[in-house]
Amino acid sequence: VIFNDSTAASVLVAHEIAALIREKEKQNKPCVLGLATGSSPIKVYEELVRMHKEEGLSFANVVTFNLDEYFPMDKGNIQSYFYFMHEHLFNHIDILDENINIPNGLVSSEDLYQYCIDYEMKIKSYGGLDFQLLGIGRTGHIGFNEPGSHYNSGTRSITLDHITRVDAAPAFLGIENVPRKAITMGIGTVLGAKRIVLLGWGANKAAILKETIEGEITAEVPATYLQNHENTTFIIDEAAASEL
Ligand code: GLP
């Protein structure tokens, strides 16, 4: 779906998430959300915070799983996704701390393998993700599933692509400070979500969105795996759609 205004589009996505939260609340069930970082979802989080403050939208029944985190990364670091999520969403809503799940960027190398398996199992223990919000990286990554990722991959550690590190360099004040690794949910984890919405804004996403939406399904562009998911919507603005 192509919008001429990313703000209006983000509001619409936030309203879909809010409707799902309320629906699950009525059923007395947890609402399990897969969340993304980056600039793309910021306005969605802004609208959810507004709805909490002005319309009483409660997140008491919401359980969240974030897609990814740099590795190694201290959660107190302002570049951490832990920091990002608290700054943009969690500090402003009534979600319970124990319902927030973000990969731990400081797990020890020895424990990393088991930690990732446990993260995956925890998502499964809730019956999977009800809704997954995504952005897209210029390599075609979703979460940090870089080119070469298997469609059936689960939560694991991954080596970041050079382009991804270049794009992250300004936030880290230089590429030499960008971690080389990350922990990410897998493609299989994401595709297990009942509903997926991918956001893409701006001309610098136009080329990768064309490949993702119109190209062949390939591990070289992991986001193309979304073509096989039956309930995925790409919500993009006109600049991002300019090469379609
Ligand atoms: C990072 C995140 C991705 C995100 C991507 C795009 O690499 N790990 O989940 O989709 O950045 O970021 P932005 O939305 O800022 O373009």
Image (cartoon, rainbow, N blue to C red):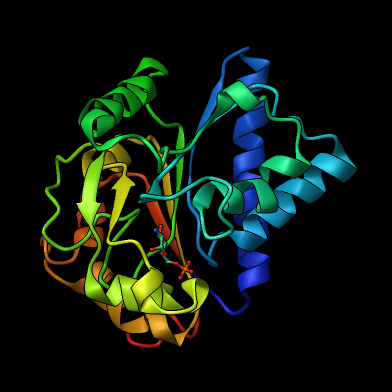
Q: Is residue 132 visible?
A: yes
* Percent x, y of residue 102: 47, 38
* Percent x, y of residue 21: 63, 31
Q: Quadrant of residue 96?
A: top right
Is 121 left, or right, of 221 in this rendering? Answer: right
* Percent x, y of residue 36: 48, 51
Q: Is residue 40 above or below residue 203?
A: above
* Percent x, y of residue 201: 50, 75
At a point 30% along the width and 28% down the height, the residue shown is: 115
At a point 86% along the width and 43% down the height, the residue shown is: 53
Dividing the image into 4 quarters, which one contains the C terminus? bottom left
At a point 38% along the width and 25% down the height, the residue shown is: 123
Is 33 left, or right, of 111 in this rendering? Answer: right
Q: Is residue 67 above or below residue 120?
A: below
- Which quarter of the frame holds ligand 1? bottom left
At a point 67% along the width and 17% down the height, the residue shown is: 26
Is 9 left, or right, of 72 in this rendering? Answer: right
